[in-house]
């Protein structure tokens, strides 16, 4: 890459009230004298319908194009998938990266214990269960847009250089998560990893010392659907960005193992997209031994605090020298050093350290 290669990422505000979501637009390419000469545009998740419209307006009016080179759905939850339908309807999309669970009958049929389930009924039930992703597939077929199902090791390349690499999940893990999901017809030997939170909490004090930290030491199970999230490493223009969707610690650990085995360090990141809107269930002390970034961005609703983000998470990031920023109703822009500045972007304040945090009461 030349020294004039530029990157910028825009995290759109998503969420009404306390309901969070992810909607990300980014572009990279060559700039000269403060002007973009060429660009490649990606959209990663689309949030809700309102943020889908905002993405379309942003790409047209800020990126000055109708072309999106890749639309990527990290996982099929509504708060990530819903807005992408509008992006695909309104803009010229070259290719879509997404998983389609209903296409995996041959992979998991031997584990289905309900003998009444057929290939057709399985597909139909899964399409209903993952309706937002299925709506994207139908629209892609209608508009003749290619859909690619990415797994660990897949990549987007430019001039033989890996720009975007899928660190997880592997196909094996993805199939196991389909089987673990409560949305899948009754399976043998698998059960959902979904957990239920308690409303019984107590307030405790934290300071900058690690002795007061309340982040989990090891895994806290998350839903199978969240752990289906694509974990993506973007390396462009001297920047390294890790996108995590709603991945839990299981998916993150396996992605870290893959990165390590392929000599991809995650301890020199420019930016970390904090998983699941800053939920305390999606990071652990163990994960943060292997990941370090100068800055972190959390996509969370304006009124999502203290669940999104959890101060337990933001405090843990600050202790480790990772500066967190939260959308909370505003657009956040991250750009590489040589990327031209924009009039619509204002400086943002980092999320503060919170001394009083809530933790569940152990019974």
Image (cartoon, rainbow, N blue to C red):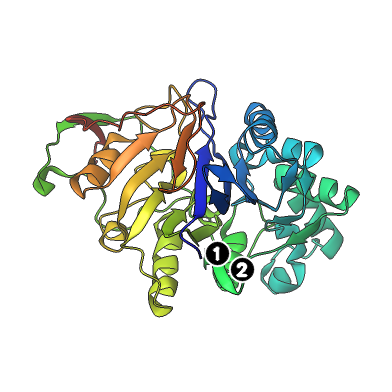
Q: Nearer the viewer, residue 146 or 339?
A: 339
Where in the figure is residue 131, as x and y percent of width and height?
74, 43
Q: Name the residue: 29% across, 39% down.
A: 314
Q: Name the residue: 14% across, 36% down.
A: 206
Categorize mark 2 by other alpha carbons within 10 Å: few (<14), some (14-19), many (20+): few
Q: Residue furthest front?
A: 33
Figure quadrant of residue 118: bottom right
Measured Cα–Cα span from mark 1 to mark 2:
5 Å
Figure quadrant of residue 264: bottom left
Residue 232 seen anywhere in this rendered image of the structure? yes
Q: Nearer the viewer, residue 295 or 105?
A: 295
Disc 2 designates what residue?
Answer: 157
Q: Answer with left or right where residue 46 lies relative to residue 315.
A: right
Do residues under tags 1 and 2 come within 8 Å of each other at their CB atoms?
A: yes
Q: Nearer the viewer, residue 109 or 228?
A: 228
Residue 169 seen anywhere in this rendered image of the structure? no
Disc 1 designates what residue?
Answer: 163
Q: Considering the image in quadrants, where does the C terminus appear? A: top left
Where in the figure is residue 319, as x and y percent of width and height?
18, 45
Vertical arrangement, residue 8 with respect to residue 52, above or below: below
């Amino acid at each position: 890459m030349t020294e004039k290669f530029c990157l910028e990422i825009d995290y759109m505000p998503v969420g009404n009230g306390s309901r969070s979501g992810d909607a990300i637009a980014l572009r990279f390419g060559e700039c000269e004298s403060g002007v973009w000469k060429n660009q490649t545009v990606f959209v990663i998740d689309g949030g809700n319908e309102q943020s889908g419209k905002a993405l379309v307006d942003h790409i047209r009016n800020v990126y000055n194009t109708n072309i999106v080179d890749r639309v990527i759905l990290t996982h099929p939850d509504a708060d990530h998938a819903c807005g992408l339908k509008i992006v695909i309807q309104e803009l010229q999309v070259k290719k879509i990266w997404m998983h389609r669970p209903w296409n995996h009958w041959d992979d998991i049929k031997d584990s289905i214990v309900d003998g009444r389930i057929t290939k057709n009924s399985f597909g139909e039930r899964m399409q209903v269960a993952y309706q937002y992703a299925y709506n994207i597939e139908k629209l892609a077929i209608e508009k003749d847009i290619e859909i690619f199902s990415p797994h660990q090791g897949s990549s987007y390349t430019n001039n033989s250089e890996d720009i975007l690499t899928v660190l997880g999940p592997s196909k094996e893990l993805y199939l196991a998560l389909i089987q673990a999901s409560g949305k899948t017809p009754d399976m043998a030997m698998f059960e959902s990893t979904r957990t239920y939170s308690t409303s019984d909490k107590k307030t405790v004090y934290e300071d900058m010392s690690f002795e007061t930290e309340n982040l989990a030491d090891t895994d806290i199970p998350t839903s199978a659907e969240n752990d289906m999230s694509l974990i993506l490493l973007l390396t462009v223009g001297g920047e390294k960005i890790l996108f995590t969707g709603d991945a839990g610690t299981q998916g993150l650990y396996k992605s870290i193992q893959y990165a390590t085995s392929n000599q991809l360090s995650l301890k020199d990141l420019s930016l970390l997209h904090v998983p699941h809107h800053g939920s305390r269930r999606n990071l652990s002390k163990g994960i943060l031994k292997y990941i370090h970034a100068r800055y972190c961005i959390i996509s969370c609703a304006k009124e999502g605090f203290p669940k999104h983000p959890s101060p337990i998470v933001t405090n843990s990031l600050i202790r480790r020298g990772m500066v967190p920023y939260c959308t909370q109703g505003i657009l956040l822009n991250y750009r590489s050093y040589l990327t031209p500045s924009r009039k619509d972007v204002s400086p943002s304040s980092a999320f503060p350290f919170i001394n009083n945090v809530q933790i569940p009461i152990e019974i």
